[in-house]
Amino acid sequence: MRLLVVEDDAPTGDLLAATLRAAGHEVDLADNGLAGRHFIEQQQYQLIILDVMLPGLNGWQLLKLIRQGGDTPVLFLTARDSLEDRLRGLELQADDYLMKPFTPADLLARVQTLLRRTAAGGAEMHRIADLEIDVPRRRVSRGGQRIALGDREFDLLVLLAGRQGQVVSSATIAALLWQTEDVGPIEVAIHRLRAKVDERYPPRLIHGAVGQGYCLQDPATGSSHS
């Protein structure tokens, strides 16, 4: 896979490029927004990792240009951990956020998820064990039995399915689904979703990581797939 990293901090850019190359990807590295635009105009990428605060063109401006030309997945990399930044990125159709500082393992997990989602054609159907999620039709079944979910329950399940096997923090769920920093309702929403998806259909697929968040995973395989 050919990836583009646009990051003006040289040590961070070098770390990103080295981590991705070690994982087998081809990587181009730009240290400002204008250079990033030049790369994008000259080359097709499977994924773009984009810092928000850039000289020349900032991340928001560059993302607008990317979306005018197509739907290449964009992972925003930023130290600005604010709800306003996350919501602005979502409005401009960023695909995911990774906050600095980050670990190489976290970076690769996010990259692999986005690349897998793209390869699956937008992940219109998720299958985890005997759970099936038909995203366009907003239908869920398990063991061949239809499961009726409310809109918020369905959106929460799709969010977890899109990051199968990864822990999604309550803060991320609240920001992405409900545009709030209040994580209080998340536990209630997870409880209701588990009651419908897990209680009558072993094994349990929705797992909690204490103090971290929640993930959707088939315990029989140790990993999940779309």
Image (cartoon, grey):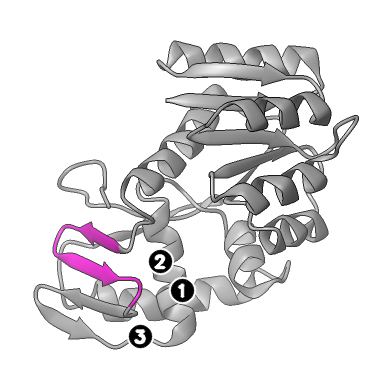
Identify the mark nearer the N-term, 3 or 1: 3
Front residue of 43/148: it is 43
Q: Secondary structure at mark 3?
A: loop
Front residue of 3/208: it is 3
Q: Position of residue 138 (x, y in %)?
A: 34, 79
* Residue that appears at 60% across and 43% down: 74
Which quarter of the figure has residue 116? Answer: top left
Outermost residue on the right side: it is: 55
> Looking at the picture, which amino acid does disc 2 mark?
Val
Q: Which residues are magenta?
A: 125-136
- Label ID, residue 149: 3
* Residue that appears at 18% across and 84% down: 146
**Separation of marks 1 and 2 at Cα, in angstroms:** 5 Å
In-image side of 208 versus 220 (left or right): right
In which quadrant is the N terminus drawn? top left
Residue 161 vertical placement versus 52 (above, below): below
Q: Main secondary structure of the magenta part?
A: strand
**Separation of marks 3 and 1 at Cα, in angstroms:** 9 Å
Q: Position of residue 51 (x, y in %)?
A: 75, 35
* Residue that appears at 51% across and 53% down: 168
Residue 38 vertical placement versus 84 (above, below): above
**Residue 171 colored in magenta in the image:** no
**Residue 128 colored in magenta in the image:** yes
Residue under circle 2? Answer: 158
Residue under circle 1? Answer: 155
> Looking at the picture, which amino acid does disc 1 mark?
Asp
